[in-house]
Amino acid sequence: MAGRWDMKSYEGQEGIGMSEHDARRFLESSRSTLLLGTLNSDGSPMIHPVWYHFDSATTKLYFYTEPALKKAANIRRNKSVYFDVDSDRWPYKGVKGKGTAKLVVSKAKSYSIASKILRRYVKKDKPLIEFALDKVKKGGYVVFEITPAYFTSWDYGKLVAESEDMRDAIMS
């Protein structure tokens, strides 16, 4: 199947990892932000929370940002990125990995991807959608594509015996 991970690029954490199918479904349905890790010019790490879209057919992640922001500058200098999408409620689960990012140069593709991202996070017919898509059209937002080289996942709900004790111990 096109876009499928192979065992060299995807693995779940031993005992608590999601299946590849469940990890894909999680990335497709989660409304959590993607935490994007880039490197500053001095080599120090920087984390950027971004809204994202996961294309399961191509196994690519996308996000948009203003072209002058630090994350865009860091990617132009060093295309290597790390990413994490996880839930903040029990049972904790998530997918993280590393890959390379590149600017999407096609305006039509950028607009299409930004539209998918906005539909994921913004209520239908809210002015923010039109505002953001207009910025994409005018170059005020640019879209980046992440090609993952590696994924791993976890789902603490799989710790059946310990799950109830852990849930009771967690403050939420």
Image: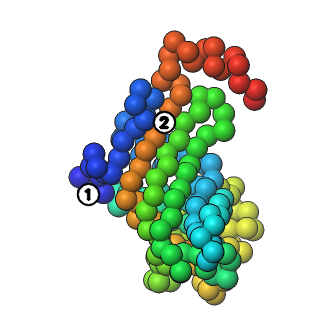
Would residue 60 be seen by someone viewing this image from the given angle? Answer: no
Would residue 49 be seen by someone viewing this image from the given angle? Answer: yes
Looking at the picture, tell me which residue is in the foreground, 129 or 147.
147
Secondary structure beneath disc 1? Answer: loop
Q: Residue at x 50, y 16 (%)?
A: 160
Q: Which mark is residue 49?
A: none
Q: Residues within 10 Å of mark 1 (few under 14, many from 20)?
A: few
Q: Residue at x 66, y 33 (%)?
A: 89
State left or right for residue 8 relative to residue 67. left
- Residue 152, given in percent of the width and then of the height, sits at 43, 44
In the image, what residue type sits under mark 2? Trp
- Residue 39, given in percent of the width and then of the height, sits at 58, 69
Q: Residues within 10 Å of mark 2 (few under 14, many from 20)?
A: many
Looking at the picture, tell me which residue is in the foreground, 31 or 145.
145
- The vertical placement of 3 against 141, above or below, is above
Per the model, the C-alpha gap separating discs 2 and 1 is: 24 Å
Secondary structure beneath disc 2? Answer: strand
Q: Residue at x 53, y 25 (%)?
A: 157
Cβ–Cβ under 8 Å for marks 2 and 1? no
Residue that numbered label 2 is attached to: 154
Nearer the camera: disc 2 or disc 1? 2
Residue that numbered label 1 is attached to: 2
